Image (cartoon, rainbow, N blue to C red):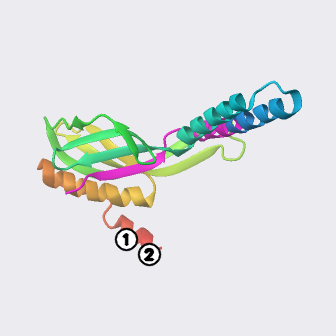
Amino acid sequence: MNNIEITSNYYFRPWMMAASMLFLLFSIAFPLNGAFLTFVFTPLTGFILALCGFFQFAVICFSKELFEYNPQTKQYRKGIKLFDIRQGEWKAFDLSNASRIAFQKYEETINYNFGGIFHPHAEADIYELRLIRKDDTFESITNGSDLKSIAKMVTLGNVMSQTLGLPFYDYIRDMVSKRRVE
């Protein structure tokens, strides 16, 4: 059986992406200004500065959150995925006192106190796969809100229940098929 991988959300915040884009434009415009108007930069210096701007732009804008589960070893890793490069440490689940795996939904409400000119209040449905203990505490395995990651979370929950020997409770049955119909 292959590893189950869920990539969702960009790892960095949108304002970091915007700042990165501004730095990229600056790192291209500044050497061009120096090369053609004031002759301060050599072409090699300008190229290196532009390359540094492009590299950090690519890292910030294309990094995604990663969750990967290996059914053979029963280990998982949370980390970052950049193109096909995956970073993160493999860990085993702490199954002491574990009772079940559950797929649940909760609503998240955000009130912006900075930059909330257009949408000062936002609500989102977050779907989460949880490892629930016998004392009703839980550990969040992974969460997301896009349809692709939701379907993978249900698949992941089923595979984990088979490999770890725990029951799987889907509290949002048929949610994926209902969304496709709408």
Q: What residue is shown with label 2?
A: 181
Quarter-wise, where is residue 25 in the image? top right
Query: Which residue is nearer to you in this view: 113 or 62?
Result: 62
Residue 79, position as x, y percentages in the image: 38, 38
Residues in magenta? 1-22
Check residue 7 for magenta coloring.
yes
The residue that mark 1 highlights is 177
Instruction: Say which amino acid is labelled 1.
Output: Ser
Residue ID at (17%, 53%): 161
Relative side of 109 to 156, left or right: right
Quadrant holding the N terminus: bottom left
Residue 33: % across, % down: 83, 33
Q: Residues within 10 Å of mark 2 (few under 14, many from 20)?
A: few
Q: Which residue is rendered at x = 61% and y = 32% of the image?
A: 52
Q: Pointers 2 and 1 in contact (CB under 8 A)?
A: yes
Q: How many marks?
A: 2
